[in-house]
Image: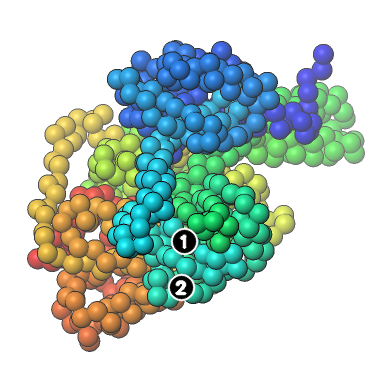
């Protein structure tokens, strides 16, 4: 039977689907999801869980894997659960089973609790699996029950007691982290809790009496009116995801449930909407999807390369036979030579694909990255041209790693070629090395990087930079921003493959007009040559209570994590997402602020511009800058003057706290 061709669209889709399934079942990125994740096979046997499952149910991973999934279900619900699982096996499709089905889980200690479950079929070479995302909804049901009881009390009590219970109900509603909004059937806002104020940025005085449509994005004008029409018919809308616009213009991803509000006689007089901000969750899901996509593309690319190599081998062998059988003086010889050269070019492309898919063989050895860069720089000078200055900055006396020297050279050369294209009028190309130590707290925030000692290779240019959409795709094979015929789109894909094959990690920081920095973290190999046997652990500075920090960071997740680290260490933190908002707050609040911790490149107003605007009104304000770019690149671009305090992202908890402590004195 002939082997299917990769040109067959169904075959490619099948391989990609299988590859995605394998990645999802084995990927550590399951740990990034907030819910308990349980994967079971067709027989209902547990094959994989994440740490959230252990925390929620009280079992260890070893106790659960191999058990029937019914061990997590109360006995009284097992028949119902078995029926749900059989129905899903017959018609597998992604579905969410909410509180209306009255689902329950059972912990190891025997206690039972209500759950909400999302089911997804995952196809792999070993068969079909079901991926269950389990969420404890005890708090949600408790609040719902409290609201129901409070409403019953309100109807039973006399008019004199009505105010007291309304106050109690308002207290319950205000205690929620979710936005709870009341509105008339025409969309006029009638109530607005503290959760809504925190999520959307409006105070009750700013929105009560206005139409709820002020939260709707311009591309969804009909969504809210349609929901209100459903509410008027007595229907509810539960757990749908949408987009809303905050006061500062940011678009938020929210999960919303809307229910009718009824008067004492039963007439529907309005609607109650509960919204949860899931923007951070969506971003994590996007990172997970991107990682899964890269893994799937890598596997597919590796399969294509292997098959194509076999075809090229046949073509090359036939060309050799023809060349031996044709008169070397005859005209057809040149055609045979053209076939041979084309085969060599095809073979070069497949080698790059195999590197991206991590299928190529490597020969790692212990080497000093500082010394290797000195040798590579000799190759770069003719490549970059006279109008590009090459700088090598070694901030550690030794940078010992275990890597394939040829592949390391290929990383630098490929990045240099891209930098050269981004600097048509010349500029600076900077290679920087230093040692970094990342603790467990850092590893918890960056799921792909285990704690330990790393050697950083930062490769920067002063070129045109890239926008966010381009950065999100630069490592994909065959993706290129160059003109047709001027690039294969495999250079950065090859870099990505080499870094991953060397157990390293790569991050990109770029803004249009501000250049680009690639940060490559490779595990330190000091221990393999007897160095760093007893590494010194830098102590964390003592807590400083009563110190106020203004945090300005436009990345929501980064801002939230940094604020949490600072508050856990005793600091009072005021956070904003751009320089203009920070300036407005500081100008309208005379409260003392001890330190400004700000990103460098932001929309509307940069960090240096913010610090300059504050220098006259708050001359004693200390300033620390944060940036994904290296200090050398920022200094070369004259974004900041030399001698300032700069924290380079990603930074560890220890580096953050100790830098602040030293700056404050």
Q: Badge 1, how many Cα within 10 Å: few under 14, some, many 20+?
A: many
The answer to whether residue 572 is visible is yes
Q: Is residue 554 visible?
A: no
In which image quadrant can residue 179 be found? bottom left
The residue furthest bottom is 616
Tally of marks: 2
- Res 219 → quadrant: bottom right
For residue 530, above or below residue 413: above
Disc 2 element? helix
Q: Residue at x 62, y 52 (%)?
A: 234
From the viewer's perspective, is 279 left or right of 341? left
Judging by the rendered image, the residue that carries numbered circle 1 is 181
Q: In the image, residue 464 lies at what x, y percent?
A: 52, 68
> At numbered mark 1, what does the secondary structure look like: helix, strand or loop?
strand
The quadrant the C terminus occupies is bottom left
| Residue under the image location 38 percent in, 29 percent down | 113
Q: Who is closer to the viewer here, 197 or 583? A: 197
Residue corresponding to mark 2: 207
């Amino acid at each position: 039977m002939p082997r299917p061709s990769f040109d067959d669209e169904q075959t490619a889709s099948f391989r990609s689907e299988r590859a995605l399934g394998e990645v999802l079942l084995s990927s550590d990125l399951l740990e990034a999801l907030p819910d308990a994740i349980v994967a079971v096979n067709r027989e209902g046997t547990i094959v994989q869980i994440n740490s959230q499952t252990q925390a929620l149910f009280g079992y260890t991973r070893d106790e659960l894997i191999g058990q029937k999934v019914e061990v997590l279900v109360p006995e009284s619900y097992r028949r119902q659960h078995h029926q749900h699982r059989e129905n899903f096996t017959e018609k597998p499709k992604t579905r969410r089973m909410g509180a209306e089905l009255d689902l329950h889980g059972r912990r190891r200690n025997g206690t039972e609790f209500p759950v909400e479950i999302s089911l997804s079929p995952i196809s792999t070479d070993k068969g079909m699996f079901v991926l269950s995302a389990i969420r404890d909804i005890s708090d949600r049901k408790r609040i719902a029950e409290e609201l129901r009881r409070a409403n019953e009390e309100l109807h039973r009590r006399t008019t004199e007691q009505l105010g007291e219970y309304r106050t109690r109900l308002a207290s319950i509603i205000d205690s929620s982290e979710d936005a709870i909004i009341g509105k008339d059937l025409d969309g006029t806002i009638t109530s607005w809790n503290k959760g809504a104020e925190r999520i959307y940025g409006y105070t009750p005085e700013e929105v009560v009496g206005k139409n709820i449509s002020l939260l709707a994005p311009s591309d969804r004008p009909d969504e809210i009116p349609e929901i209100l029409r459903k509410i008027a018919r007595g229907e509810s809308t539960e757990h749908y995801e949408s987009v809303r616009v905050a006061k500062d213009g940011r678009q938020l991803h929210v999960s919303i449930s809307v229910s009718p509000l009824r008067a004492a006689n039963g007439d529907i007089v309005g609607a109650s909407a509960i919204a949860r901000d899931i923007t951070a969750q969506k971003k994590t899901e996007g990172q997970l999807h991107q990682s899964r996509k890269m893994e799937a593309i890598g596997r597919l690319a590796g399969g294509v390369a292997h098959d194509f190599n076999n075809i090229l081998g046949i073509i090359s062998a036939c060309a050799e036979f023809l060349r031996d059988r044709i008169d070397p003086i005859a005209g057809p010889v040149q055609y045979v030579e053209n076939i041979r050269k084309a085969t060599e070019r095809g073979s070069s492309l497949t080698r790059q694909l195999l590197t991206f898919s991590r299928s190529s063989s490597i020969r790692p050895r212990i080497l000093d990255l500082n010394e290797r860069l000195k040798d590579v720089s000799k190759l770069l000078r003719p490549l970059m041209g006279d109008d590009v200055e090459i700088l090598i900055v070694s901030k550690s006396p030794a940078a010992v790693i275990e890597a394939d020297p040829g592949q390391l050279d290929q990383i630098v050369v490929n990045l240099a070629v891209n930098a050269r294209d981004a600097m048509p009028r010349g500029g600076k190309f900077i290679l920087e090395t230093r040692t970094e130590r990342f603790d467990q707290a850092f590893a918890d925030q960056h799921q792909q990087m285990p704690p330990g000692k790393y050697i950083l290779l930062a490769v920067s240019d002063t070129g045109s930079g890239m926008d966010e959409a381009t950065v999100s795709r630069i490592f994909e094979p065959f993706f290129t921003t160059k003109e047709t015929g001027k690039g294969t789109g495999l250079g950065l894909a090859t870099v990505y493959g080499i870094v991953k094959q060397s157990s390293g990690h790569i991050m990109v920081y770029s803004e249009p007009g501000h250049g680009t920095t690639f940060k490559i973290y490779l595990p330190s190999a000091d221990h393999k040559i007897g160095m760093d046997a007893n590494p010194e652990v830098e102590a964390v500075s003592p807590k400083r209570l009563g110190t106020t920090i203004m945090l300005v960071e436009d990345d929501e997740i980064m801002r939230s994590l940094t604020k949490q680290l600072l508050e856990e260490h005793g600091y009072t933190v005021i956070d904003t997402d751009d320089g203009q908002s920070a300036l407005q707050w500081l100008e309208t609040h005379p409260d003392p602020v001890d330190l400004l911790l700000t990103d460098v490149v932001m929309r509307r107003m940069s960090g240096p511009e913010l610090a300059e605007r504050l220098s006259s009104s708050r001359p004693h304000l200390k300033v620390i800058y944060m940036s994904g770019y290296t200090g050398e690149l920022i200094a070369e671009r004259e974004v900041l003057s030399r001698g300032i305090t700069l924290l380079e992202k990603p930074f560890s908890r220890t580096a953050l706290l100790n830098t602040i402590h030293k700056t404050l004195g």
